[in-house]
Amino acid sequence: MLIGFVIVVKRLADLGERAAIRQINSILTKEKKHHGIGDDCAAIDMGNTYWLVTTDMMFQRTHIPKQMSPYQMGWFLVAMNISDIAAKGGTPLGVVCSFGLPKSTKESFLKALTKGADACAVKYGTTIVGGDTKETVEITLCGTTFGFVKKSEFMARTGAQLGDIVAVTGTLGKAGAGYYALNRKKQEKKLTNALLRPLPRLTEGRLLAKQQSVTSSMDLSDGLSASLYQLQEVNTVGFEIKKTALPLDPRLLHIFSNKNEADLYDVALHFGGDYELLVTIQKNRFENTRKTLQKKDTALTAIGRVTRKKDIVLLDKGKRSLLENKGYEHFRKHRF
């Protein structure tokens, strides 16, 4: 007779999104020629090129602030998909959007939602080519973007090497600044646009790809700390990040002008939503790559280096500490 036998049933809240994805990946049949789960996009071997496919969802409770307009929802849906294409150095070919909406939704909402999605697609050189509509209890939006990139220019998450420079495009903390601005009832576009209407780094991704100096790449939608941990998981290396090198966005400095430094860097490191690119670049080619982006008015900032030991260290005023993974992960509780 068995006494005290307990069956432990794990929930997604126990696993978190990353572990859930690993579970899914362990079950699926693999095709060796393709890049599958674990990167920003699926990359399907088409000879000299990869066909890129990415998909992303938005749900009312987890992704959509109450201040976000229907137009901004449509824009955001397309932008976060295009960001994945950008992180691989690709060019988008088309977008399909699925709208799950309550039957009480107004026609004007649907029109504005569609206009926002269309405007973002057109801005980045593509169009909405199809999709689906369904009745749902809450707003549920899904976008899928197709693209392509030459194999020689494809920027995978894997490939970081000892001594490479760790760098980011643009600035950090702008989406977090927008979040706190909304919480304080400040809705000025200059403060909230980065949160509600992000601008993916498609041009910068193509420029980086053409340089062929990037050894690994992903976007920063989940925050810097979470992204570094995701890169570490698929590479046999670690990272040293210099806190004072982080390019803080002026909007973040404005919002946190009366708060202590710890709060400001906490947002820059962990909040997410900036849709910048995180890359590792060969050390001897970093400066030329930086200058190439500078010519297009985009900053590429070195924030650290790739190390041999498989951990992530934050350097601050001569002190070394392990950088915690506090970035966004679905199914987990969040502090922000």
Image (cartoon, helix red, strand yellow):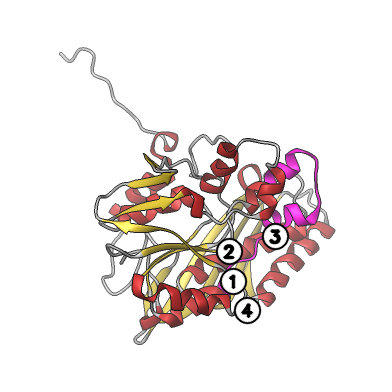
Relative to 215, residue 262 above or below: above
Which one is earlier in the sequence, the residue at label 2 or at label 3? 2
What's the mark number on residue 298? Answer: 1
Q: Give coordinates of residue 153: x percent, y percent.
A: 40, 80
Q: Which residues are magenta?
A: 179-202
The three-letter amino acid code for the residue at tag 3 is: Arg
The three-letter amino acid code for the residue at tag 4 is: Thr
Q: How many marks?
A: 4
**Residue under numbered circle 3:** 197
Which one is earlier in the sequence, the residue at label 2 or at label 1? 2
Q: State if disc 4 and disc 3 touch (CB < 8 Å).
A: no
Relative to 139, residue 335 above or below: above
The kind of secondary structure element at disc 4 is: loop
Q: State if disc 1 and disc 2 touch (CB < 8 Å).
A: yes
Which one is earlier in the sequence, the residue at label 3 or at label 4? 4
Q: Whole-Å distance between the Cαs marked 3 and 4?
A: 17 Å
Q: Which residue is found at the position 73% from the left and 39% from the top?
A: 183
**Residue under numbered circle 4:** 126
Q: Which residue is found at the position 36% from the left and 87% from the top?
A: 48
Which one is earlier in the sequence, the residue at label 1 or at label 4? 4
Q: State which quadrant residue 152 falls in.
A: bottom left
Q: Whole-Å distance between the Cαs marked 1 and 3?
A: 18 Å
Which one is earlier in the sequence, the residue at label 2 or at label 4? 4
Other-residue count near label 3 (Cα within 10 Å), few / some / many at <14 / 14–19 / ≥20: many
Q: Give coordinates of residue 144: x percent, y percent.
A: 55, 66
Q: State if disc 3 and disc 2 touch (CB < 8 Å).
A: no
